[in-house]
Amino acid sequence: MSEEIKSEEATTAKANPTPSHAEMFFRYVAALSQAAGVQAFTLAIAVPKEDGTSAVMGVAAGAAGTTPEWQAEIAKLLGEQAVSASKTIIAPAEKAPEVV
């Protein structure tokens, strides 16, 4: 009897809610970055929620098999650039961002 219950549970699929357009965009950009062979990236997107607040989705990834020193340096550089870029949300950029 317990075997029947186990086999029924194994074949029952749980329905996942359909991702929103923002979630699909987020997943697409992250997957595209990884597939394109980008060394490392960070991505954060704010999307509106039904209650009038915002949800922030974020992901970061780097190339596998790199040294801890490289990972720390890239994480630092990506973080600095993210902080710099996010300032343009509050005040418009005075000049084009410098590419490092």
Image (tube, helix red, strand yellow):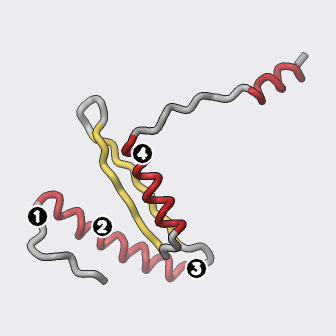
Instruction: Please tell me whether mark 3 sits on a helix, a strand or a loop.
Output: loop
Residue 68: x and y in percent read 55, 78
Type of residue at label 1? Pro
Q: Earlier in the sequence, mark 4 or mark 3?
A: 4
Instruction: Please tell me whether mark 2 sits on a helix, a strand or a loop.
Output: helix
Whether residue 9 sits left or right of residue 51 in the image: it is right
Q: Earlier in the sequence, mark 2 or mark 4?
A: 4
Seen from the viewer's position, the closer of residues 29 and 63 is 29
Type of residue at label 2? Ala
Tag nearer the camera, 3 or 1: 1
Q: Residue at x 43, y 80 (%)?
A: 73
Query: What is the CA distance from the residue labelled 2 to the residue labelled 4?
Result: 20 Å
Q: Is residue 71 above or below residue 55?
A: below
Do the numbered discs 2 and 4 sit on residues whose CB atoms are within 8 Å? no
Look at mark 1 in the image and give the residue it sits on: 92
Q: Earlier in the sequence, mark 2 or mark 1?
A: 2
Residue 20: x and y in percent read 41, 38
Q: Residue at x 47, y 52 (%)?
A: 27
Look at mark 4 in the image and give the residue it sits on: 23
Q: Earlier in the sequence, mark 3 or mark 1?
A: 3
Instruction: Please tell me whether mark 1 sits on a helix, a strand or a loop.
Output: loop
Look at mark 3 in the image and give the residue it sits on: 66
Type of residue at label 3? Thr
